[in-house]
Image (tube, rainbow, N blue to C red):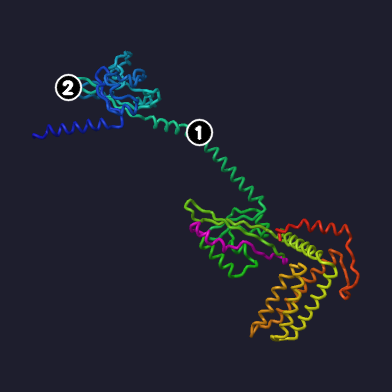
């Protein structure tokens, strides 16, 4: 048993080390409340060094201890070195009144034995540190007997941050109902806004997921575009792509792409969205055809997995018609500008010559059922002449097409075993003739320049000055960048 003192000494050392390194303020006072021992945590909590408070009253750190209001006190009886609270049911002890003295022992005893009002915590005190900053602390005081000497053990925890959090939580709770009401109103308002958009947006909007069924919420205009009210729960592919000008292969690729996208990472949408159809034409009752444009958007969850696809459908039939009309007018104005750069006699020479060459080529093609090298030479030479003249006069809309025909003749000449497609060759001539007739029509109807096709030397009717001015002003308005 010779090792017992060593064990005790080691145990005491460990306890002292624990007190010195504890994150809370641990101190002891004598029976007068004078601090006799304190750990370094006092600097962090109160801003005092140990030497500043040693030998000072505990009230230097926490003056509020003198002014705590207690509802009543519990009698404390001593039995040896133990203290216990009497059970009210076993012993009737007269409850002492709060003492009003100011000595140190008095406030320490009152703290130990006093009970604060319901809803309050006795150990929680608001005080200030050395610099005057407000601190919330939780303090516990215990009376101890050391070798017959009365002392008090005091432990102080800094709960300032906890109190701030509690305060914030209280404020949140106080306004929680108001916040919930505001949030509910905001959600309702947004829902109304979305519903209003769906009811008034001049586009067809719908969503669907992996079962390919159209969800109940869709825009009202979708019924107008598709001319049906049987939309909700319909198969989206059958709903959108019945009686359209899309081939079976396009439809198959689109279905496969949708299967690859839904339920997968958004990356799959980025990889496959190019396969999804963006425009098509659809037939309706009475042979009416609508031009429709469609766009696709992915709706993902928090993990970026595509849960739904959003489809936006637009009826662009009228827009297409206007675009075609605008394109036709633009082309017509360009032809007018090209014709006006050539004299009337030269223009008529070009028209007459081109028609003669076309007629010769047509008779050659009709009279041959297979390749004839001599005939091909004539076909090529005539077409090359038409192209050369058109290029000289700047008739660009003629030049581009005739160049393609000329190139095909050239390939036929080089090929020892060509496919002599008589119908195709005649169709090319008819298209060339149509383009030449278009120039002739503009010259006569828009510019009013007429001359006999059988007499190159016939008089030319001159344009009215005002009409010429109007035409040239219109040409000046053409933006070359739109070509």
Q: Quadrant of the N terminus?
A: top left
Whether residue 449 is visible to the viewer of this picture, yes or no, is: yes
**Residue 202 vertical position relative to residue 15 in the rendered view, above or below:** below
Whole-number angstrom distance, CA of label 2 to CA of label 1: 56 Å
Seen as rendered, the residue at the extreme right is 459
Which secondary structure, mark 2? loop
**Numbered circle sitting on residue 147:** 2
Q: Measured from the top left, where is residue 421 in percent x and y? A: 69, 81
Which secondary structure, mark 1? loop
Q: Which residue is mark 1?
A: 175
The residue depicted at 64 percent of the width and 60 percent of the height is 293
**Residue 5 vertical position relative to residue 437 in the rendered view, above or below:** above
- Relative to 479, is 108 on the left or the right? left
Quadrant of the rendered structure where residue 25 is? top left
Q: Measured from the top left, where is residue 75 in percent x and y? A: 27, 20
Seen as rendered, the residue at the extreme left is 2
Q: Measured from the top left, where is residue 269 in percent x and y? A: 53, 59
Q: Is residue 284 magenta?
A: yes
Q: Residues within 10 Å of mark 1 (few under 14, many from 20)?
A: few
Q: Nearer the viewer, residue 121 or 2?
A: 2
Whether residue 90 is visible to the viewer of this picture, yes or no, is: no
Q: Nearer the viewer, residue 284 or 378?
A: 378
**Numbered circle sitting on residue 304:** none
Q: Is residue 411 magenta?
A: no
Magenta segment: 262-287
- Relative to 402, is 85 on the left or the right? left
- Relative to 100, is 330 on the left or the right? right
């Amino acid at each position: 048993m010779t090792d017992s003192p060593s064990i005790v000494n080691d145990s005491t050392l460990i306890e002292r080390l624990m007190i010195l390194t504890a994150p809370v303020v641990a101190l002891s006072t004598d029976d007068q409340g004078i601090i006799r021992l304190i750990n370094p945590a006092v600097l962090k909590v109160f801003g005092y060094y140990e030497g500043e408070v040693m030998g000072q009253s505990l009230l230097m750190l926490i003056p509020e201890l003198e002014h705590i209001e207690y509802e009543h006190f519990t009698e404390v009886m001593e039995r040896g070195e133990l203290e216990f609270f009497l059970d009210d049911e076993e012993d009737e002890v007269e409850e002492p009144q709060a003492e009003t003295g100011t000595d140190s022992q008095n406030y320490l005893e009152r703290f130990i034995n006093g009970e604060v009002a319901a809803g309050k915590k006795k150990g929680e005190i608001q005080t200030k540190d050395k610099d005057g900053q407000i601190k919330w602390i939780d303090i516990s005081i215990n009376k101890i007997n050391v070798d017959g000497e009365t002392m008090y053990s005091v432990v102080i925890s800094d709960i300032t941050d906890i109190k701030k959090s509690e305060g914030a939580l209280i404020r949140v709770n106080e306004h929680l109902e108001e916040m919930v009401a505001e949030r509910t109103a905001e959600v309702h308002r947004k829902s109304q806004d979305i519903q209003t958009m769906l009811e008034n947006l001049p586009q067809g909007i719908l969503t669907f997921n992996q079962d390919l069924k159209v969800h109940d919420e869709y825009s009202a205009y979708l019924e107008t575009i598709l001319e049906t009210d049987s939309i909700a729960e319909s198969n989206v592919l059958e709903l959108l792509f019945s009686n359209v000008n899309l081939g079976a292969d396009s439809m198959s690729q689109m279905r496969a792409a949708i299967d690859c996208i839904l339920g997968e990472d958004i990356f799959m949408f980025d990889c496959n969205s190019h396969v999804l159809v963006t425009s098509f034409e659809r037939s309706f009752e009475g042979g009416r055809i609508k031009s429709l444009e469609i766009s696709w958007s992915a709706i993902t969850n928090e993990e970026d997995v595509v849960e739904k696809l959003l489809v936006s459908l637009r009826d662009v039939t009228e827009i297409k018609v206007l675009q075609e009309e605008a394109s036709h007018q633009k082309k017509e104005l360009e032809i007018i500008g090209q014709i006006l750069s050539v004299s009337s006699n030269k223009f008529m020479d070009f028209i007459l010559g081109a028609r003669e060459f076309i007629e010769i080529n047509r008779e050659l093609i009709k009279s041959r059922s297979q390749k004839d090298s001599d005939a091909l030479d004539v076909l090529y030479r005539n077409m090359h002449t038409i192209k050369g003249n058109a290029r000289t006069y700047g008739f660009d809309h003629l030049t581009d097409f005739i160049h393609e025909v000329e190139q095909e003749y050239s390939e036929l000449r080089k090929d020892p075993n060509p496919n002599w497609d008589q119908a195709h060759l005649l169709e090319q001539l008819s298209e060339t003739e149509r383009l030449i007739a278009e120039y002739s029509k503009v010259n006569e109807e828009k510019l009013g320049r007429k001359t006999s096709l059988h007499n190159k030397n016939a008089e030319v009717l001159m344009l009215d000055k005002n009409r010429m001015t109007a035409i040239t002003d219109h040409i000046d308005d053409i933006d070359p960048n739109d070509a």
